[in-house]
Image: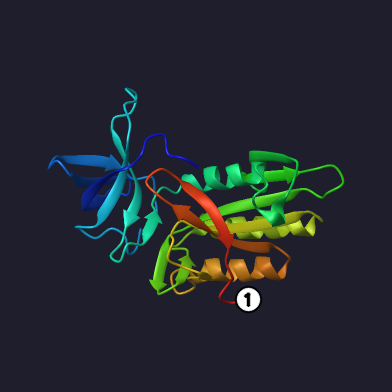
Amino acid sequence: MNFDTPLIPATLIRRYKRFLADVTLNDGREITAHVANPGSMLGMKDEGLRVWLEPNDDPKRKLKYSWKIAELDGGAMVGVDTGMPNKIVGEALRNGLIPELIYQNVKPEVKYGENSRIDFLLSEEGKVDCYVEIKSVTLSRQTGLAEFPDSVTARGAKHMGELANVVQSDQRAVILYLLQRNDCDRFDIAGDIDPKYQTAFMTAREAGVEVLCYRTNLSQTGIEISEKIPLAFA
């Protein structure tokens, strides 16, 4: 999934009001960038952090820069935009790049459950329908280990229950955790951050909800799906 415009570097001053960040560009200008991430962004919002912005010249947009990648000490790259995973996975599904999810028809944002929308509904003649929920993973508190969530997510717990109901209706349900960082090779649930989500996750898994976790390759031009990685608790 390529960015609309190649990214440019900047230095973080502060992130605030969830969706805003003040940064300093390389030419010394201080600007405000949009941050498409409602989470805590734990571990990637410290002052002085090197960040990568996507410029835009859209007259309808008030802010002319969007924060897309955080570059951590040591060079690790982390995708900030929580809207990117659906685009990345959607492209991968349509191109048959996820072996566990090869279907002829890929339909995004389909209503199901109680006032919810599944990220992707996969269908093909001769196969049961497959409901796929995507989660963006950016948290890492231990070397090599990625975790989700980075804050309490009642909505995420609700989705786990609805996926379990899909399985009980004799259809496939998959939750795919997409690691928007290039320095982790294992994945786990951050139960200390949200015990209710962990309980909902384990209940759904026991009910037959499938769990997949894939890494990504990140660069200043785009983010692409990479290899599948193991679950730390499997």
The answer to whether 136 is drawn above or below residue 125 in the figure is below
Query: Where residue 173 sits: x, y (%)?
Result: 70, 56
* Amino acid on which disc 1 is placed: Ala
Which quarter of the image is occupied by the C terminus? Answer: bottom right
Left or right of 90? Residue 191 is left
Q: In the rendered image of this protein, does residue 177 appear above or below residue 68?
A: below
- Horizontally, residue 97 falls left or right of residue 41, namely right
Most foreground residue, 28 or 187: 28
Between 107 and 94, the residue placed more toward the observer is 94
Q: Position of residue 80 (x, y in %)?
A: 38, 51
Query: Could you tell me which secondary element the residue under label 1 belongs to?
Result: loop
Answer with left or right where residue 36 lies relative to residue 225: left
Q: Residue at x 70, y 71 (%)?
A: 206
The image shows residue 230, relative to residue 219, as above or below, that is below
Residue 120 position within the rendered picture, expressed as x and y whole percent measured from the top left: 64, 45
**Residue that carries the numbered disc 1 in the rendered image:** 234
Q: What residue is shown at x 78% (from left), y 54% (from top)?
A: 171
Instruction: Residue lying at the far top in this picture: please name it.
Output: 59
Q: Residue at x 39, y 57 (%)?
A: 78
Q: Position of residue 180 (x, y in %)?
A: 46, 56
Q: Count the marks: how many?
A: 1
Q: Residues within 10 Å of mark 1 (few under 14, many from 20)?
A: few
Q: Quadrant of residue 39?
A: bottom left
